[in-house]
Image (cartoon, helix red, strand yellow):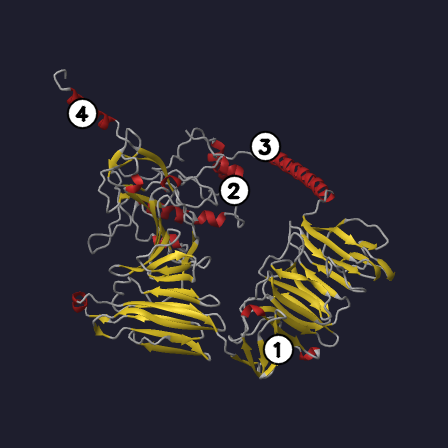
Amino acid sequence: MKELPRVLRAAYFMFLFGIFASPVWSLTVTVDPGTVVSINRTDTSESKCTVCVGGDDKSFCQSGAVLRDAGSVSVTFTCTEPWDVFIVEIMKVIECKTKPCRHAVMPVDSQPLSVFNRTFHWCLRAPVRMTFHVDFSKKGLTQIPPSDTCPDEHTYNLVALETTKNVHLGSFCAIGTITGVQILNGGKVVLTVAGKKKLEPQAFDVFWGEDIKSLAVVSVDLPKGQSTQEFFSPNYPLSFPDDDLMTWDFGVPRFHETKVKILRHMEPRCRKKEPGVEYEFEHKQELIKVVKRLSDNKPTELEVPFKLSLRNCEMDQVRTRAEALGLSLHFSVSSIRSGSELLCEVDLSEENSLSLHIAKKATGSTCILKLDGVSQESVIVPPGKKSTLSFKDCPEEDLLLTVNKTIGCQDLQDCPPLPVPLTVPVLERCLPESLKTVHWNIQAPDHGTVELQAYTGKLRQSLPGQECNGSVNFSVAESDGTAIGRFCPTGFISKLQVRGNVTVSASPRNDEFLSQTFQTFFKASFTKEIKETYIFHITPEKDKKNLLASPGWPAGMKASSTASWITNFAPRLDAHLTFTMVTQPKCSARHTGIQVQTLGSQEEMYSRREDEEGDSEIVIPESFYLNVSNCLPEKGSFSVMGEITLMKPRRIILPVILGVVGTLLLGMFIALVAVCVVIRKKKKQMAHEVAIYNPNGHSFLPGLHGMPKTIEDDDAHIYDYIEDTLVYGHLLRDELEMDQYGAPAVDTYQPFNGPTETTPLKDTDPLKEPSGEGEMEMEVGEYRLFIPPTESAPPASETDASQEDTNSPTDLRLVENDLYSVGRDEESSPTPLTPCPEALQAPVFRRS
């Protein structure tokens, strides 16, 4: 080293410093579950900077990295400005397997990676053929040429999945008139954000859409007033897929004219069919289709919503590639408010109870309304006839539409037998969509009552704590405008009865308009006249506060009116009725009253007037009747608000009585068991043990079934001791009989005094057939089995018949026992003997 020149020495140290002091840039990346983060060099980068994943001891450096596992991971770059070298892609899969399928997507940025150019991918995937609907209706999109960029540097790209390749549907910027895109067979939504640009997310929804026949359908809602939008075919400026279809669905505001103009197009060489543009729209309730050539440069003018479809032919691929041709289309859609008079024919000839009221919202409006050619400030379309309306310079937001429908009958016998649902008929599409209110005027017959019920389920009244939060308000009032209350579904009111005519009104909750297809939940019917003004039939829910309020709350009840709540609930429950708020007026005539009594009883459990104080809570043990009545107020108003809670009763006397009775019964049972045990022990001690001798060699008791054991297998013939009196007692009895009668006893043992054989007896099978044809020779002194005559033989049992072919020694001995037991059966008592449990438990003899 000392011999090196000074210049070389300095260069050497600089080289070492460059190796060991290389600049790096580190960060920690958090990967969400189900997300894949990819870090790669850009295609134009020539840098040798690498990315290292993991800690210092486990790091692995390369030109790119893919982070899959959820959690935090350390990432290090071997350069100081990696955002100029690398791009980041964040991918997530959205999968729909079954209906319904809906995903709310909100782009989320990773703060450490915000300095890089980021691309977010949402892959739409399904196991079956389906349509993905990507909904951007919250803010919308605007299509731009593929070469352009968005002002906010947030660019959306939509990709459709074809059988062989992906199709680029277009590039889009946030905020615009495109509200959604339906993609067939899945695809991809891509959002590209520039580096060092804060992510400004736009939420969108992905759900299972309706079946379509196009590659994709783009939904566009043209704005009111003057506007111009430009659109491009998929893969623009390259060719649209071969023999395929692309559709744009345009919504046009009322009183607007649209103009479609083809700005640029290119046509391919075709083998079959011909490319073209098809317009589809509705005119006088008929679907019209118009097909035009791409070369037709004349603008197409329309005043109604329409669909525009681009259809490709079956291209000649060889000539198309050679001539660099293909199908592409660039067109514009312009919209402008129409100054002409718009006619609308309304047919109510079959609606005898329906009328329409159209009025101007502002007094200084320049809108001109005409009914059958006559100019009017407001128009009432009468029922039961056809009418012609005309609108000139009438913006939709300047008009208010009200629908009135009458339901009623003159006599109770002529009323509809079934409840009538409160619905809105389908209106003409040319009518203003600014539907503000719908009134159902329900007219009760003479001496009749109107009943209101929920179409399905039950109703509830809108009160503090249980407000109606739907988009539509439903209010019920009497025909003179006296309010009864606001109601909504899902409650405990099964029926509302009103004596007299009733009006049910539907209106939007906010300052918006009603949809002409909104759902109602009321149905009306008619019944005989009631005594009260209003009757609520309710079924409170258990362990829940069920709120109720007097009609017209909080303004107060109508003078001299009455209201009742017929409350039904299950037995073995108590209803806790609490009056949370009661306002009393100063009466000029009569009194206000609050009464409570159980159903079927004439006695009042609770009663209170305006000049009396009463309990705020009472407990009612069964279904009851609550009645409130108003006086003729001089000052103030009468209103009642309360709540009903069903709970199990707290009764102590009955459980105590049941406990005492149960204890007594248990004591009596124990005493009875003790007496039975004592008696049983005494009987057992008094029983004598009996020894039984069986000469057959088998010991079994009557009532015990089963095959007795053989002599070889059973040791019943072995005894320790047998009393002589028990074995030879019958001989003593026979001797007494001989002495008394002088004749030998029958069935007694007699000694044999005759000659005996000296030759041993042969062990011959008595049932064996002879071998010869002659008769069997009978040997003297040989034991033979006695076979009684057929007439005297006992009937064979089923068991014996089944064992007829068995020739084993055991079976032969069984036959012997059966035959020799005939005499004993005849001598036995006709009453069968039942062995007692004690005899079965203890042996008859002590065996060795």
- Work out whether mark 2 precedes mark 3 in sequence or the reverse, and give the earlier one: 3
User: Dot 4 lies on which element?
Assistant: helix
Three-letter amino acid code at the position of disc 3:
Gln
Furthest-top residue in this view: 2
- Indicate the quadrant containing the C terminus: top left, top right, bottom left or bottom right: top left
Say whether disc 3 or disc 4 marks the residue closer to the N-terminus: 4
Which circle marks residue 11 in the picture? 4
The reply to whether the C-beta atoms of the residues labelled 2 and 3 are less than 8 Å apart is no
The residue where tag 3 is placed is 685
421 vs 663, left or right, is left
Query: Which numbered disc, 4 or 1, marks the residue that appears first in the sequence?
Result: 4
> From the viewer's perspective, is the residue at label 3 or at label 4 nearer?
4
Examine the image and state in which quarter residue 684 appears.
top right
Cβ atoms at labels 2 and 4 below 8 Å apart = no
Query: Which of pointers 2 and 4 lies earlier in the amino acid sequence?
Result: 4
Callout 4 amino acid: Ala
Residue 424: image location, x then y, percent: 57, 72
Q: Residue at x 39, y 55 (%)?
A: 798
Q: Mark 1 belongs to which amino acid?
A: Val
